[in-house]
Image: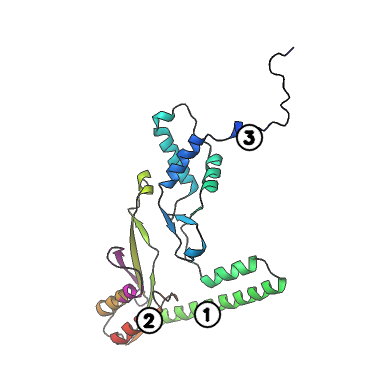
Amino acid sequence: MRTGNLSDKRGESQRDKNKTPEADVDFIVNIINKLLKYSSHYRREQTETLYLEPGMTVQKIYNLYKTEFAAQEEIAGRKCLEFSTFKKIFYNKFNLRCKSLKKDTCNKCDAYAIAIQGYGSKEEKELKLQEHNAHLEKAELLRSKMKDDFERAKVNNNIECLSFDLEKTLPLPRISTNIIFYKRRLWVYNCGIHAASNEKSYCYVWAEGEAGRGAQEVRSCLLNYIDDKLPKNVDHLILWSDSCGGQSRNIKLTLMLKAAL
């Protein structure tokens, strides 16, 4: 026969027994708080979401947590939390996103993809799909035209065709030491110029403390190439780039090209 407390415990919540200790939660929160975070360059006023540096993942942060957990002598005897628990704390306590390293995407293609996958009538989605297909056909036509210009530059000494673009910013130094996740790194910019006539590419590289990454900088890179590397016999220069107004499609670039004639 059992003795002692025989009170009815049916329906009693087990939530407190499975609850993650506050000390463990605070330890994780402190680690994540120390990570560098950035706001988006787009629609800052409409979102409170912050972004971690490119390449950072929840798994990497968890590995960082395990390393720091093992280094703390005063928490000896406690167990390191499982990844599933860590992940739950990460998403419940923070409004953070991990930016993956990916290629640039077309703004119009992104907008069409959202419209097609989003809510709306079948007719509306079909219309957006037709518009997207027309956009892709136009893009393919332009690629074909650019390829033709490249071939013209290869066979005609009086023609040069350049493609140029301001590449993604690079954080330096690129090392995997844990402490780098807490430090503000130096951003390095790169304007790439490719010459079709000789299939050579040139990189104009500078640090954020030297200059920005706008129209003036792109203009300076192009002007330097035209002055120093463009063959003197070229009398027909063709330029290809994206349609970024702040960098390559603006009055500053137009005035520079006019002055370079």
According to the image, label 1 marks what residue?
141
Q: What is the three-letter code of the residue carrying label 2?
A: Ala
Query: Is 256 left, or right, of 43 in this rendering?
Result: left
Would you say the residues marked 2 and 1 are in contact, meaning their CB atoms lie under 8 Å apart? no
- Whether 58 is drawn above or below 249: the answer is above
Looking at the rendered image, the quarter that the N terminus falls into is: top right
**Residue mark closest to the camera, 2 vs 1:** 1
State the residue position of label 2: 153
Picture residue at 44% right of the left edge, 59% below the top:
39
Question: Element type at marker 2?
Answer: helix
Q: Nearer the viewer, mark 3 or mark 1?
A: 3
Task: Give whichever of discs 3 and 2 has the lower sequence position.
Answer: 3
- Which residue is nearer to you in this view: 53 or 48? 48
In 3D space, how far apart are the residues under numbered discs 3 and 2 (Cα atoms)?
72 Å
Query: Looking at this view, is 178 or 182 the one in front?
Result: 182
Q: Position of residue 108 (x, y in %)?
A: 54, 72
Pick whichever, 240 or 196, lies toward us.
Answer: 240
In magenta segment, residue 203: yes
The reply, left or right, for residue 220 in relation to residue 19 is left
Look at the numbered disc 3 and give the secondary structure of its residue. helix
The stretch in magenta equals 196-219
The residue at which mark 3 appears reads as 15
> In terms of image quadrants, where is residue 225?
bottom left
